Amino acid sequence: MQFITALLDSHLAITAYELCLRKPSRDEKPGVSTALAWGSILLAASAIWTVVGVIVFLAKPVYRDWLVPISLIFDFNHILALLWQFLLVVTLCICSAHCVSGFFQSYPLLIDQIIYLGALEVTLTLTTIYVMTPSISFLWSHRRPFPPVSRTASIWSFPLVFVGNVCYQSIRHSSAFLRSLNATTCIITLFAFFIILYPVISRPNTAYYHPIDMLIFRAKSQHEHYVSYATQSYNLEEAVAQYRRRYRMTPPPGFSAWYGYAMTRNSVIMDQYDQIYNDMLPFWSITPEQLRQSTQALILTPENDVGGIKIRAGSASVFDNVPGTHRWMLDGVAAMINKFAIHLPDMDLAFNLNDEARVAVPHDEIGHLRDLARAVEDRSGKQPWSADRADDWESIEEGHGQVVLQDMAFQNTFLDFGSISCPSSSPARRLRDLYSHSHLCVSCMSPHSMGQFLSNWTLSADICHQPDMAYLHGFYLSPAAFQDSHALVPIFSQSKPHGFNDILYPSAWNYMDKVVYAPTDPTGDPEIESYNPGHPDPPFEAKQNTLFWRGSTSEGVSSGDHTWRGMTRQRLVHMANNLTSSAHDTATLLLKDESLPENRYKYITIPGNSIQSLNLSTDIAIVDKIARCGGIGLHDCTDQEAEFALVHPTDFQSHWQYRYLFDLDGAGFSGRFLAFLQSHSLPFKTALFREWYDDRLTAWHHFVPQDMRLHAVWSTLAYFAGVNGTLPNGKKAEMKPHLKEGERIAEQGREWAGKVLRKEDMEVYFFRVLLEWGRLTDDNRENMGFVPGGGL
């Protein structure tokens, strides 16, 4: 097919050249026959490729999605984008054809004097426009130090093209008309040059303060505001009043029991449960009977990978049809529920057994459901739970129910499930394939960034302004397990990305101590320490000044198409260990500029392999073996083995010897982050998935956030760990370490986690979730609620 393409392109080039030289007959209208010729040529090329496409479609089923992407057919925004591009191409071809052989036919006296306008002329004009337009757009929209822009390249790239164009036209053209036309073009071009020149001159290339200093200062105020908002009530009556003010309805029955439970567990967070409200809100538009039926259908079908828990007479138990591989998880969930199950009504719950989220309702539909839920102005009922609720939940026997979930494993899910929750006008819906995947998408990261650094952790989770996320995480690139629904069905999940409608609950992984913070001090006995040296957690200053990460390639599946190159974990390991000096492998750092006055910083871009000369210490590696890979000859496995130096697994408790610990998601949430927070080390965190506690933590106050693109990792490490090295140009690179700032964030995160992320806090949160779910599934829910003094 590539050989055929080369032949066709050669034929088109020769034909274009012949049309440029062709002289029309006297009775021929200018440019008409040339335009018809071009139209015939393009139609013929289209016909040839249509025949080839039909043959390939029939003979090679594996290429059908590439030839006719079904998702594209039903995506209105992509159709409009393609039509617009087709229109531009057709317009360019027609105008070029007329320009080449038709325009100068109106001036027969000139034909004998000059070689009329040709393809090279059109090419030079388009090149000038190509250089000018993106330069103006980029420079006027990015007038901050990041991303760094070379003033020399910015100023001279366009003038060089301009001078070349003028010289060419001066040599080729001798007529007065063309000279006047050329003069007009020069004036317009010079005007455009000054439009470019102004933002280049006015654009600062240095920062007067380090952005991390500002982000840390701002995070302190944000955390204080959150604490004041989350802890405003000091008794039951105030808690009820806060609930009604925030959520415009009375609390569910059992609220007094929840409040008493939270008080006995010393819960700090008594009022701020917006995540629960947002998760439950759209379900108010679905009848209780439909919610119960959906729950049953989900649990009954083994192919759904959904497990069930039933609560009867104040006791929670797991349904027998849960597979043994996931039994531990639901046993842990049931153990958590049984701490407070005596206060809950009878009901059934459907739990996601996979890591990946499950429910993504289209933007317009979920908006309509939320509007319907909010339309009920008065939910101030006072009645208790309905009697005989168990009779409303049909018995779940062995057998198959209705499969309600769509299997999208091993496929890119961003278009069908990731961005579907975004408005149709958002970049994620309009621009997914209309930008370079080889460069940093500055417009994607700038809304939630301050220069190079992530400034808004909440907004960074919103993918609607980030079309490049389609290729930056395994969950979107090629998930290992992905059975999802566009319909709003009630599934409880441990984590979810932006736009998904699963109901969040605290993970049994953390509750059952699958990964636990348990440092041990040396015994003092040399004989014992020879085989068991202990794993202490020393003070921050005594730790190794190193960024540490260990993990596996479990983020997504790469089965022969090099998908692994976009996954976050593989990108991190490549960045830390295998950087080269190629054009794309560079690193941009914000460093102290010694040539400028005090407290001035400058972004410097260097080849990736020069990082080692800055003495930034990292220990980042993939352990054991490459997982979730394949392809013909398993080349995606062998390619990764060649790219990454695999290491043996280490004891989890050995993390505490390092100052900086990197945390990344895998196929779902990271199970290690809570342990990292509890330590004296400073967590660096990048995450696509959000959990139940997400709004309780403040980035830059409790942990150090990192963008999914990882473009600020080196600058962030340079800020905290310090730099003392040499740049490729021989100049000295220095950055004083900010150890006190790093230790302060580490200790603030440790202290706050000990207050709001305990097992008791998981129980309190889940208790409140299930009270809300119990009300939603009750036929009398509009009249139910708790009021002080009601005895409920």
Image: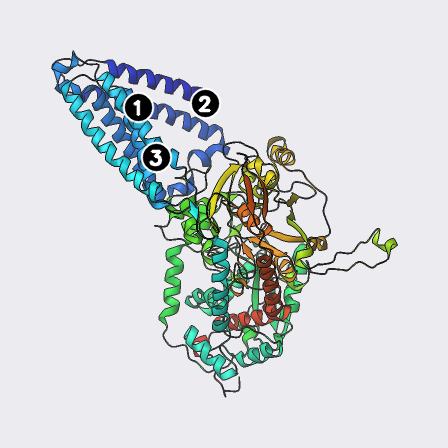
At label 2, which amino acid type do we have? Gln
Which residue reaches farthest right?
527
The residue sitting at the bottom extreme is 789
**Can residue 257 be seen in this snapshot?**
yes
Above or below 380: residue 440: above
Q: Please state, as top left, top right, bottom left or bottom right, where the N terminus lies in the image.
A: top left
Q: Label 3 belongs to which residue?
A: 155
- Checking the image for residue 278, the label placed there is none
- Mark 1 neighbour density, 10 Å: few (under 14) some (14–19) many (20 or more): some
Q: Image check: 117 left or right of 446?
A: left
Q: What residue type is disc 3 on?
A: Ile
Please name the residue that numbered disc 1 is placed on: 164
Q: CA distance from mark 1 to mark 3?
A: 15 Å
**Does the residue at mark 2 contact the one at mark 3 (Cβ under 8 Å)?**
no
One can see residue 29 in this view: no
How crowded is the residue under tag 3: few (<14 C-alpha within 10 Å), some, or many (20+)?
some
Q: Which residue is mark 2?
A: 2
Q: Is residue 6 above or below residue 481?
A: above
